[in-house]
Amino acid sequence: MLFGRSKKNPISISDKGVVDWKYGTCGYCSVGCSIEIGLNAEGKPVTTRGVGGADVNRGKLCIKGLTEAQIFEASGRGTTPLIRDKIFEDWQETDWDPALDRVASEFKRIQKQYGRDALAVISTGQIMTEEFYTLGKLVRGVIGTNNYDGNTTLCMASAVSGYKRSFGSDGPPGCYGDFDHTECLLAFGSNLPEQHPIIYWRLKQALEKRTFPVIVIDPRVTMFAQMADIHLPITPGTDLVLLNSLAHVIIDECLHDKTYIDLHCNGFDELAELVKRYDPTTAAKICGIDEDTIRHVARVYAKAGAAMSIWTMGINQSTHGSDGVCAINNLNLITGNIGIPGGTSLSITGQCNAMGTREWSSCSGLPGYRVLENEHHRQEVGNFWGVDPEFFPEKRGLFQTDIFPAIETGQIKALWIVATNPMTSMPNSPRIRKTLEKLEFCVVQDAYRDVETTQFAHVFLPGAVWAEKKGCFTNTERRVNITLPVAPPYENSKPDHWIFSTLAQRWEQGQNMHFPEDTADIFEEMKQLSVIDDSSKGRMLDISGMSHELIEKNRGLQWPMALGDTSGSPRLYSNGVFQFADGKAKLLAMPYIENNECPDQEYPFWLNSGRVVEHFHTRTKTGKVGNCNKFSPTAYMEINPDAAAELGVEQMQYVRLVSRRGDAVVLAQLTHRVPYNMVFIPFHFHECVNRLTLGLLDPYSRQPAFKQCAARIESIDQAEAARMNTELRKF
Ligand code: SF4
C-alpha cells in the first residue's frame, strides 16, 4: 500500500546523465565546502553534489553550491578579449596578443609619464591561491606599482588589522571543530544561517549532541538571532562600547584568567584602567543593551570552561571595525580562550579565497605574511624571485578605498580590476561612476563581460571560472583545499595565472624571472617560500608539508603544516606564543569615539545592509542561476510595521529611499526583524543599496562602514517606481 506523497505526487529528480564526478572546492564562499561536479557523456558539467568524506561539509551544500554547475555557460561569459579606444564606444573583439600588448604598452606609458604608482591594481578573493601568488609576483616584482590591493578591504580588512594588532599576525586561530568543544558562543554581527549556511549546520550538529549558550549580538532579529538563547539588539556601530563593558564586568568581578594574562599578554593594566569607564550602567545608554544583560552575558562567557567568539561584517564594516576585532580578541585573551578546543576568536571570512589573497597575493606586503616594512623580508623575497630588493617599496601603498579618491585627484591614471565589481560593491556608487570615467586607461579582467564595471574599461580580458583550472583556496579555518579542472576554459577565455604570466613576458624584468606554467609548480614554489626562515624561528604560514595530491586526498589540509607532518593544524597559538617579538599578545585599550552618520530629523532611519542565502556578492554568478533568482529575484527593504504605518507604507509597495548620496526605489517588506528606526536592504543588487551608502572608513583597516548611515523614506507613484526600478537595473 502507498502512503502520503508517494501515493499522490512522488518527487522525481531528473537524470542528468552523469558519467563522471570530479573533485573541487565550492567557488562561492569561505566555508570551503568540498564539492563534486558531475560530467555528462559529452564532458559537460551538469550538476554538483557535496562530498561525504570531507570534514568541512560532510556531504552538504547550500543552494549556491547545489546550482554551481550552471555558471559555466551562463549568459554574459567573456568569450574573447575586447578592446576599444574610448569607454562607452562599441567593443572590438581581438585575440590575446594584441590585447596584452595594448595593456602592457598603456601601463608602461602611464608609469613613464606619471610615475610608477600612477597605475593601480585591484584584485579579488575569487581566484586560486597560485594565481594570487603569480599576480603578486607580477605587480610587486615586474610592474612595480605600490597601489595594489584586494577587494577584501571591503569585507575582511578589519579582521586582518585586528589580528595583527592583537596577535602580531593575520591568521584566524580557530576552526569549525571548536563548536564541538565550546561551552559558550558569542556571535557578533553574523547572520550565519544566511551568510555561511554550512558553518551554521556544523553549529547545529554540535548543539544536537550537547547544549551550550548561543548569544547573538546584532541590531536585527536575524535568522541566527531567532535561534539564539540570548539576542542583544545593539545600537548600530556601538560594538566597542559593549565589548569594553563586558571586559569591565569580567575584570571588576575577577573573572579573568590572571595566570594566562601574566604569561602571555602585555597591556593588561592599561586595558583595566580604560574599561573602568565602561560600567554597564553607562554603556547601556550608548549601546542600547540593558545593564543586567551586559553583566549576565559577561559572567556566562567568562565562567564557561571554553568560550569562543565569531564575527562577520557587523563588526568589520564599521568605523570602529579594527578596534571591534581587537576588543573581541581582548575578551578571549583575558579569559584564556585562544588556541584551546572550543576557545577561540574566529573571524568568518567572506569569499572562497579571501584567505588565499591575504596569505599569498602580496597585496598588503609580500607573500607568506611578509611585510614590506621589514628589510629582511624584502631581501628574502627579492633574492628568491631574482628581483633587486630595492625595487620593492618600504611600506604598503593605498588601500582599495583610497585608490578611488586618488583617481579623483588625478594621482592615479590607470586601473586594472581583476575579478571584482566596484561599480556595485563600493559605497556611494554615483561617486564611483564619476571616478571611473576619469581614468585614462582601465582594464577589467573577469569571467563575465557583463559585470557593471566593464562599462568603464578600455580592455576586457576574459578569465576562466574556478573549475576550468586547477588550484587551491584557503577557507575560514585555514584549510587549503583544491579544485580540479572539469572543463576547458570557455571559448577563448584563459586561466588567470596564464594571463598574469603571459603579461609578465612584456617586460624585460618579467622575462628574466621564472613564471611556472603549471599551478602545481607554482604551489611548489610557494612551499619553498613558506619555509625560508626570517629569524631563528620557523614561519607561521608553513605549507611545506602539503602538495596538490595530499590536499586532494585529505579533502583539504590546515596550515601550518611543516615538511614531514602527517596532518595540518586545527588551531594557532595553542602554545601561548604569539607573533610579536617577545611572543606575547597585546591587550589594547581603545576608547569609543562616536563618528558615524547617525539618523536625525531629516534622515530618521538607520540604513543597514547584508546578505541573503541565495546570492553571492554582486550577483555576477548567482544572478544568472535560475533557482537563486527565483527565490530572491529583487532587492527589498525591511521596515518595521509601526514605522510603515506612520508613513502610510504598505507591504510590497514601492518607496523611494533617500540618503545624502542618492536615492533608490525599493519594495517594502513589513517585518519586526528590524527595529522602528532601521531599514535593511540586501547588498547584492546593483540598482540599490550602494547608491545610498556613505562608507566612512575605519582608520586602521580602511574598510567602509557599509552598515551604518542615515536615510529617509519618501512615497512614490507606483507605476513610475516600477519604471524607474527597471531603468536603474540597466546601469
Ligand atoms: Fe559553497 Fe559556501 Fe554554500 Fe558551502 S556554504 S556550498 S562553500 S556557498
Image: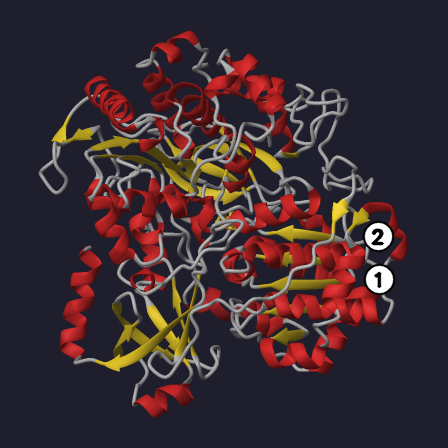
Residue type (three-letter) at the residue carrying disc 1: His
- Which residue is the extreme one toward the left? 90
Q: Is residue 6 among what the camera can see? A: yes
Cα–Cα gap, marks 2 and 1: 8 Å
Q: Nearer the viewer, residue 303 or 213?
A: 303
Task: Establish if 275 lies above or below 391.
Answer: below
Task: Establish if 276 lies above or below 201.
Answer: below
Image quarter for residue 510? top left
Residue labelled 1 has its Cβ within 8 Å of some atom of ligand 1: no
* 554 left or right of 513 in image: right
Residue 331 rendering spot, x and y as whole percentages? 73, 59
Image quarter for residue 273? bottom right
- Label 2 or label 1, whichever comes before in sequence order: 1
Q: Nearer the viewer, residue 246 or 637?
A: 246
Residue that badge 1 annotates: 256
* 228 left or right of 444 in image: right
Task: Establish if 357 lies above or below 11.
Answer: above
Residue that badge 2 annotates: 261
